[in-house]
Amino acid sequence: MSYTRPDGQRPDPTPATFGYDPARALNASGTRTPWGLIMTIALGVPSLLLFCVCAGFIGLYFAMPEADRRLAPDVDSTPPSEIVVVSADNLFREFVASESEARQAYFRRVVEVSGTVREADEFFGIYFVTFENDLDRETSVICQFSPEYKHQARAIRPGDSITVRGRCAGWISNVSLEDCRLSN
């Protein structure tokens, strides 16, 4: 007597094994199992997500302006010809007038800023100096001193006229300079 499956096909004459037959994707009853689909989803979906995330980061990198991709220079080793000299008041005015143009001109560049000190503060061992400006009492140019120059920052008092050299970090609720030190 021969057995015929419900789909009209005759079973393979090889004996049925218990469980899954990986060579033919058949289970013990001789019907197809969705293991290929399960494995495609289990491996394919995470791979596709990883690819999309990587492609997104690459796309964002090339979509950002040239100024954002520029490597941050070392404040001490920047040649004098590449240092941008500006007053704190003018630097602040340029960012208020057009942040995008000012960012193009100053972001990640070494800037030498002169002006009158409004505040000199320390927060958690980090020293900040805020310059006065004619436009706004709440926001201004803020300089974060490098830890090795904290002895300089401790000597600064409100009302002092100083010149600070640092790297422009752009507009972060204020015009921010980082890695600062007093300039000669």
Image: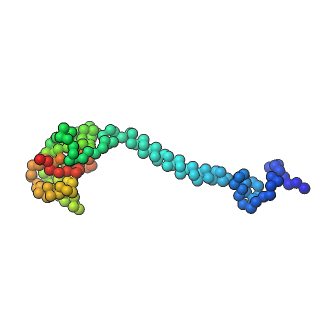
Q: Is residue 139 above or below residue 62?
A: below
Q: Quadrant of the N terminus?
A: bottom right
Total labels: the figure holds 0
**Residue under the point 72% across and 51% down:** 24
Q: Is residue 47 above or below residue 125?
A: above
Residue 158: x %, y % from top left: 11, 54
Between residues 78 and 6, which one lies in front from this camera angle?
78
Q: x, y (%) of residue 116?
A: 11, 48
In which image quadrant can residue 57 be found?
top left
Left or right relative to 64: residue 39:
right
x 46%, y 43%: residue: 55
Q: Is residue 98 visible?
A: no
In the rendered image, residue 136, in percent from the top left (x then y), is placed at 18, 47
Which residue is most to the left? Answer: 160
Which image quadrant is residue 58 in? Answer: top left
Tell me: residue 62, above or below residue 174: above
- Residue 102 in the image, given as x and y percentages of width and height: 24, 39
Q: Quick one: which residue is furthest to the right in this view?
A: 1
Q: Nearer the viewer, residue 82 or 111?
A: 82
| Front-most of residues 14 and 64 | 14
Please tell me which residue is depicted at 13% across the width and 52% down the height of the picture: 118
Residue 128, image quadrant = bottom left
